[in-house]
Amino acid sequence: MAAAPPAHLPVRTVPPPAIVWPHPSAVQAKGTPARMPPPVPRVTPVRGVVRGVPAVQARAATPPSRILAVPTAIVQCKLGGPAVRKIAATAMGKALKFDDENPQQQDLDQNRTLLIEACGEQLAPATQEHLTQVAAEINKKMKPRKLSFSPIVVQVQQVVQVEHLDVFHNSAENITVKTGAATVFVLARVEGQAVTDQPDGESVAAGTLRAPDNSKVVTDTTGDGEVESLVENLDKFFAYLENTAHQSANRHFTVALSGSWGACDGCKKRIARFRQLWRVKAAECMEQGTTARLTITYQYRNAAKEIREGNLYGWGEDSKTGGWYWHTETDRVDGTKEPEEI
């Protein structure tokens, strides 16, 4: 048996192969991992975020990406029950119109818009599959009245490929379905390397990640395992971007998170704020003609579930492969800074 990597090293996981889809954010890439590396010895997980400067284990052989046909992608894009119920409840709080014998087209169009808005708080963008599921859930609750809406026509504009990260914290394989939600292992890197640039204290912007708004899902989860690591690593990314030595070439920033549960609704907002703040700083610091990319992948063991008075942990649209649920979000910005004269 191959020797386990030292405790301070991260582990490389072969992620699911990519999905090709006409809209980049319509679905998350899913599939079946080719194989997993040998697990590290089991240890008792430590509450909170595990920090450290890791290196890299030898790369596992990665087969060519398998391109899934669009019909398969549509099937995999279906929402889980908790997500459908939550979006349906949000939509029912809006001014939906239920049809009579002669429904008006403007009413059908309005219902579609309101369903898209309700889905948009969880998904970006919503697909026809999502709307059909949510409408069916509303109809189930509102019998005998029926909600109808105009269908969305999805037009193929461009083909993109979204891939999950494949390198995670070395202790990720110690996570089980029973590991506490406060245990989250985070690995943040740039160009595959640990960030050595150190910030001069905590920035005001990064500090807002603890409470991006005053909603209950945020204020109830300030102690979740992702929070402090997101604050710390955003400031490290800022310090890296502010270093002029890094501004004249394309850069890829990555954040790999591992936990027993996916992000709660509060931490979803924190991740969204992390991405927003990173985009602004990257565009400001990177020189014209360069591109900065950000990839955030969250792998988690348990299916999405409502906990703490309706707070959804995980993403309802994710599917489980290789023992993990997979979720990836990406950003790309072009630099706007004028190159310095030599």
Image (spheres, rainbow, N blue to C red):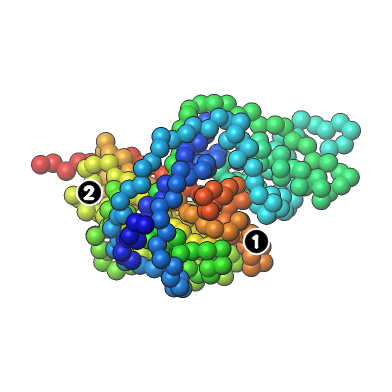
Residue positioned 58% across, 59% down in the render: 302
In front: 173, or 141?
Answer: 173
Residue positioned 68% across, 54% down in the render: 82
Mark 2 or mark 1, which is nearer to you?
1
Which of the 4 image quarters holds residue 189?
bottom left
Residue 139 image point, x, y percent: 81, 45
In front: 135, or 190?
Answer: 190
Which of the 4 image quarters holds residue 220?
bottom right
191 lies above or below 154: below
The quadrant of the picture occupied by the N terminus is: bottom left
Q: Residues within 10 Å of mark 1 (few under 14, many from 20)?
A: some
Does residue 245 appear left or right of residue 311 in this picture?
left
Mark 1: amino acid: Glu
Residue at numbered disc 2: 246
The secondary element bearing badge 2 is classed as helix
Residue positioned 79% across, 41% down in the render: 147
53 lies above or below 246: below
Rounded to the nearest whole Å, what is the CA distance between mark 2 and mark 1? 42 Å
Residue at numbered disc 1: 306
In front: 219, or 176?
Answer: 176
Mark 2: amino acid: His
Residue 275 image point, x, y percent: 43, 51
The secondary element bearing badge 1 is classed as strand
Residue 216 image point, x, y percent: 60, 67
Farthest residue, direction front: 1
Does residue 78 appear left or right of residue 193 in this picture?
right
